[in-house]
Amino acid sequence: MPEETSQSMAVPSAKNLSPNQGIAAAVSAAQAPQDVTASVNTQQQQSQNPFVVEAPAIPTQEGPMGIRYDFNDGARVLLPKGKWHVQIEDDETDNIIFACDADEGWVLSTKKYYIPFRIRVWVRGEKDPVLNHTLDLKGKEVQIKFPVGTLGDIIGWMTYADRFQQKHHCAAEVTMAHNLAEIFEGQYPNLFFTHLPGKVRFEKPYASYMLGLFFRGDTTHQPIDFRKVGLHRTAGYILGVDPREEAPKVKLGSPRKIKERYVCIATKSSSQAKFWNNGYGWEQVVAYLQDLGYRVICIDKEPVTGFKYTWNRMPHGAEDFTGNKPLQERIELLEHADFFIGLSSGLTWLAWCAKVPIVLISGFTLPICEFYTPYRVFNSHGCNGCWDDVNVNFDHYDYFGCPKFKDTDRQYECTRLITGKQVIGHIKQLMQDYKLTAPKDDK
């Protein structure tokens, strides 16, 4: 899961705007405002995050009379000196979402997600606009920006970038971390992939859109709070495309490297709330699988992870296939597994791409957060779902964070109450549904 992102524009000269001036800001300023939309620490500058691609310093499109405009992180208009009247409209609805008089400077939409904007600029007092432009992405250079390097988020959002390009027939540049671009690039010839950190392909895009999870009720960068629609589907809403889930395409069809039948597991995550915090659970599950005759392959990046006084180790009996491996190697291992067992974390999303049956264990998220699997393990008897609770702001800087019950006997009960028996029950159902026999019974 990605870290927290800033929720609002950083436009110092807009502080004195009154609430009734609409949802855009007219600003007289020499410099373009810098939006911090994806920094892990909102007090850091964007340049410190190698996965943030900033909008060009000035709008990329030339209009009449020295007016410049574009749709990079919202509608942007830069006005020369003059007597202007500006309107930003939603062309789908014909709503005027902002109107102002300005003598010079910036007019910026507050909303940064996909809206079919229409920009109109008049010389004040004249009847006909000198600029009348409706967003039209066909054939235009467009950036779709993935502002974090985390595995699960990018996998969850990838399909929606593809849908966006196919809907608008634009030249779409997708910016993402190098190791993630590697597994997708060959599967999406309609997209241009930029490997970050690195230089972008389109230096003067017509439009750009930032994907991400935006917290604290932010509806500036997302039309609907992601906690209401799910970690992956939020990208569909940001880009204005069909939000129904679909696993992204990766390269499959590799030769099998392990002769025996096996199950892959991934037991690690980035904070303690995301682990399966039942002290006996993993060992019970691994022992059950071994009794069936399975090899149990642990594919976590690290065999041991933790912080301060709490360390999470690879389950006893699992085979150590951990390591900082190329993702394609993980895909090749996953696609030949009988099934996968994991948490709400990146390797589980990768297993989704590999089209392997998945047992997904999570309590700090609600089932809506992840892709659908009939083997979603969730216990409703205690506190649960803090990640998707719109009344809770998850603290990403607290490794031991538990929003409601930290430092009490109920801490992490969302997964402590998920038992080995419960997970084994889902495994039995999966094996029945897929008509999997125990390897020990193979002839």
Image (cartoon, rainbow, N blue to C red):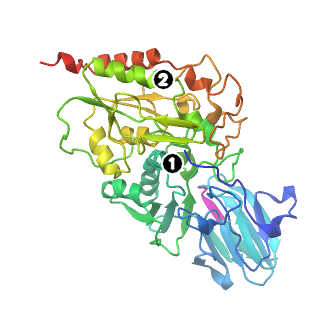
User: Residue 42, can we see it?
Assistant: yes
Mark 1 and mark 2: Cα distance apart in space: 30 Å
Q: Residues within 10 Å of mark 1 (few under 14, many from 20)?
A: some
Single out the mark in the foreground, 1 or 2.
2
Quickly name the residue at label 1: 241
Magenta residue span: 114-118
Query: Mark 1 touching mark 2, by CB under 8 A?
Result: no
Above or below: residue 53 compared with residue 112: below
Indicate left or right for 52 with 180 as reference.
right
Q: Position of residue 139 (x, y in %)?
A: 44, 67
The circle on residue 377 is 2
Quarter-wise, where is residue 10 in the image? bottom right
Name the residue: 53% across, 33% down. 275
Q: Earlier in the sequence, mark 1 or mark 2?
A: 1
Indicate left or right for 426 with 46 as reference.
left
User: Residue 430, can we see it?
Assistant: no
Q: Amino acid at mark 2?
A: Val
Q: Residues within 10 Å of mark 2 (few under 14, many from 20)?
A: many
Looking at the image, which is closer to me, 207 or 147? 147
